[in-house]
Image (tube, rainbow, N blue to C red):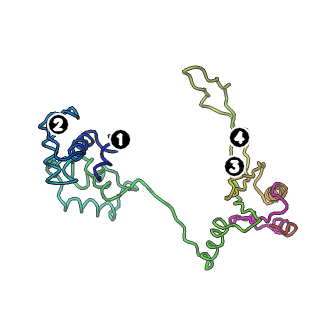
């Protein structure tokens, strides 16, 4: 029954689905003739005979097309190796990273689409850069386990909010009135704007429930963080402990914050 999965055109190419229907129809009864199967499916007898013989000879590979030779390769294995090694090890004098055009020129290949295909085959993406940072904290692994453990298995009768700030958010207003949406016309806004001020968003995200506690403040200091912690105190039910997760920003370790946490023992 393995050919059944190719029967629907939604799962395979249309031609493969038709060939599979021929094979399944031939197997539906004891030795049906090619003519009877062709009449039932609306095909000609020669087509039924062809794919029936192919399936008998090659089994599941029979309904598939034979591999086509295609055009001969224009780039040798040595040239491919040269392009890959140059991409990984060589540096450009007048650019920060290789492009397909610069690599094609340096390797002496044409057209430069060959370079793109080679990069894709080897998973090379010179245009992408990712950043990382290695911690020098000797207790880094233990701290990661504590934080991840809180996220994955929060204590009973407790909430685990992740607290952070987004500072210097610009408050912008359109310089022109907004034109409302109309049939076949989207809402339109002018490209220019008027900068009013900046604000800072403080937010606490509860990983378990998805609830967010947030507030806006004009500045980004320990005093504003203290006010935000007081808001968390009022919004979280009094019978629950609060396990705060914060980064090492200086405002989080200020004396006013430490004194505030000491006055709220459930934090």
Cα–Cα span, label 2 and label 4: 76 Å
Residue drawn 19% across the image and 54% down it: 59
Label 1 or label 2, whichever lies nearer to me, is 2
Q: Check disc 4: other Cα within 10 Å, few if <14, some if 14-19, many if 20+.
A: few
Q: What's the magenta region?
A: 235-261
Q: Nearer the viewer, residue 226 or 50?
A: 50
Cα–Cα span, label 3 and label 4: 9 Å
Q: Nearer the viewer, residue 54 or 204?
A: 54
Contact? badges 2 and 4 (CB < 8 Å): no
Q: Is residue 50 left or right of residue 114?
A: left
> What residue is disc 4 on?
171
Q: Nearer the viewer, residue 157 or 2?
A: 2
SS of the residue under disc 4: strand
- Residue 168, numbered circle: 3
Cα–Cα span, label 4 and label 1: 50 Å
Residue drawn 23% across the image and 59% down it: 80
Label 1 or label 3, whichever lies nearer to me, is 1
- Pick out the residue farthest to the front: 30
Q: Is residue 128 left or right of residue 252?
A: left
- Residue 36, numbered circle: 2
> What residue is disc 1 on?
10
Q: Where is residue 131 shown, x and y percent of the image?
A: 51, 61
4 or 1: tag closer to the N-terminus:
1
1 or 2: tag closer to the N-terminus:
1
């Amino acid at each position: 029954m393995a050919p059944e999965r190719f029967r629907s055109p939604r799962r395979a190419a249309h031609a493969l689905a038709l060939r599979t229907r021929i094979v399944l129809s031939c197997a539906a009864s004891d030795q049906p003739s090619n003519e009877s199967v062709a009449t039932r499916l609306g095909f000609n007898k020669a087509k039924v005979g062809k794919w029936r013989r192919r399936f008998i000879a090659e089994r599941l590979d029979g309904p598939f097309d034979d591999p086509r030779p295609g055009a001969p390769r224009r780039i040798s294995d040595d040239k491919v190796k040269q392009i890959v090694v140059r991409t990984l090890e060589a540096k450009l004098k007048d650019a920060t990273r290789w492009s397909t055009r610069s690599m094609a020129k340096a390797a002496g290949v044409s057209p430069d689409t060959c370079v793109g295909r080679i990069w894709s085959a080897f998973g090379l993406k010179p245009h992408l850069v990712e950043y990382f940072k290695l911690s020098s904290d000797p207790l880094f692994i233990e701290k990661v386990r504590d934080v991840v453990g809180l996220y994955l298995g929060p204590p009973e009768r407790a909430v685990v909010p992740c607290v952070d700030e987004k500072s210097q958010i610009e408050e912008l207003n359109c310089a022109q009135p907004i034109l409302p949406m109309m049939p076949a016309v989207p809402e339109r806004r002018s490209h220019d704007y008027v900068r009013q001020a900046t604000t800072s968003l403080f937010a606490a995200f509860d990983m378990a429930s998805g609830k967010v506690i947030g507030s806006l403040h004009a500045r980004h200091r320990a005093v504003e963080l203290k006010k935000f912690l007081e808001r968390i105190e009022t919004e979280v039910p009094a019978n629950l402990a609060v396990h705060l997760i914060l980064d090492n920003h200086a405002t989080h370790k200020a004396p006013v914050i430490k004194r505030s946490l000491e006055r709220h023992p459930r934090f």
